[in-house]
Image: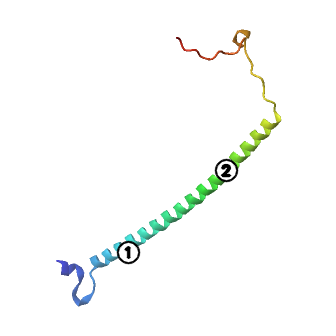
């Protein structure tokens, strides 16, 4: 049976062998195309992550700069109490454990 698949009379490959070769070639080409696609996609994802990281750093630096400028300009507000009973009347005493 194997001989009949491999060769027909007069040394010509059978139709089945040619189909198997074509299928094998297609699988190889599809595999190569898939590998090239995945490689390019990984490179693109890496470029995206690098750019996103740079933008994130720029944004954080700008936010910190804005907050630092506001903190330097604005005086520190005194604490506010909503009612007079919440205002401490005397300094807190340090904890004294019972004797």
Rendered view: 55 above or below 36: above
Q: Pick whichever, 14 or 75, lies toward us.
A: 75
Where is residue 90, by image quadrant? Answer: top right
Identify the element where label 2 is drawn: helix
For marks 2 and 1, the one nearer the N-term is 1
Residue occupying image coordinates x 78% and y 26%: 77
Q: Disc 2 and disc 1: Cα gap in Å?
A: 48 Å
Q: Residue at x 31, y 74 (%)?
A: 20
- On residue 75, the disc is none
Pick whichever, 91 or 61, lies toward us. 91
Q: Are marks 2 and 1 in contact (CB under 8 Å)?
A: no
Q: Regarding mark 1 in the picture, which secondary structure is present there?
A: helix
Nearer to us: label 2 or label 1: 2
Question: Which residue is at a point 35% across and 75% down the rendered structure image?
Answer: 22
Crowd class of label 1 (few under 14; some 14 to 19; many from 20; radius 10 Å) = few
Q: Position of residue 84 (x, y in %)?
A: 74, 10
Q: Position of residue 79 (x, y in %)?
A: 74, 21
Query: Can you tell which mark lies on residue 25?
Result: 1
Number of marks present in the image shown: 2
Mark carried by residue 57: 2
- Residue at 56% x, 59% y: name it: 46
């Amino acid at each position: 049976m194997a001989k009949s698949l491999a060769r027909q009379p007069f040394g010509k490959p059978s139709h089945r062998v040619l189909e198997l070769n074509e299928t094998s070639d297609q699988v190889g080409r599809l595999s190569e195309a898939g590998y090239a696609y995945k490689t390019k996609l990984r490179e693109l994802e890496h470029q995206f992550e690098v750019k996103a990281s740079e933008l994130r750093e720029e944004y954080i630096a700008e936010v910190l700069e804005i907050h630092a400028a506001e903190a330097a300009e604005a005086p520190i507000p005194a604490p506010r109490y909503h009612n007079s009973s919440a205002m401490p009347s005397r300094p807190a005493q340090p904890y004294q454990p019972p004797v």
